[in-house]
Image (tube, grey):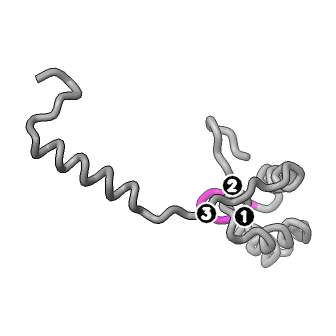
């Protein structure tokens, strides 16, 4: 059979059911985009190797680890992370096309 063709009507019914389920899923409300100045501040924190690696942990976990190690991470970073803790754009370091943001 040519690519993209369904085997029979049963397959089409199953496909329709899946589409309905996807449409019925509750969606998380969209977060407003963070202030570009905040994102720049967080990007600089991400790129500051003096606070240790940032792979596999949240920015707040990295900040807290740096604080426990006596590395004096910037206080405004922690304040921003706590203020925007429900926004994944702020909580997590972004990787885009292989570059960390």
Where does label 2 land, which residue?
Answer: 93
Foreground residue, 98 or 35? 35
User: Percent x, y for residue 39?
Assistant: 81, 52
Foreground residue, 35 or 18? 18
The residue shown at (64%, 58%) is 30
Within-10-Å neighbours for mark 1: few <14, some 14–19, many 20+ = many
Q: Secondary structure at mark 3?
A: loop
Dots 3 and 2: beta carbons under 8 Å?
A: no
Where does label 3 land, which residue?
Answer: 29
Foreground residue, 15 or 60? 15
Which numbered disc, 3 or 2, marks the residue closer to the eye?
Answer: 3
Where on the picture, by quarter, is residue 51? bottom right
Q: Real-space Cα distance between discs 3 and 2?
A: 21 Å
Q: Real-space Cα distance between discs 1 and 3?
A: 22 Å
Tell me where the magenta segment starts and ends, as one range: 52-58
As drawn, the label of residue 59 is: 1
Q: Earlier in the sequence, mark 1 or mark 2?
A: 1
Left or right of 8 in this view: 82: right
Q: Secondary structure at mark 1?
A: helix
Left or right of 47 in this view: 26: left
Relative to 13, say whether 71 is above or below.
Answer: below
The residue shown at (73%, 46%) is 101
Q: Earlier in the sequence, mark 3 or mark 2?
A: 3
Dots 1 and 2: beta carbons under 8 Å?
A: yes
The residue shown at (17%, 42%) is 12
The residue shown at (73%, 60%) is 90
């Amino acid at each position: 059979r040519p690519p993209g063709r369904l085997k029979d009507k049963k397959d089409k019914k199953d496909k329709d059911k899946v589409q309905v389920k996807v449409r019925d899923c509750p969606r998380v409300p969209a977060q407003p985009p963070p202030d570009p100045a905040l994102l720049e501040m967080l990007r600089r924190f991400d790129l500051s190797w003096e606070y240790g690696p940032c792979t596999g942990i949240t920015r707040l976990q990295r900040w807290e680890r740096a604080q426990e190690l006596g590395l004096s991470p910037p206080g405004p970073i922690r304040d921003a992370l706590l203020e925007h803790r429900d926004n994944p754009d702020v909580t997590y370091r972004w990787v885009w096309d292989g570059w960390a943001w």
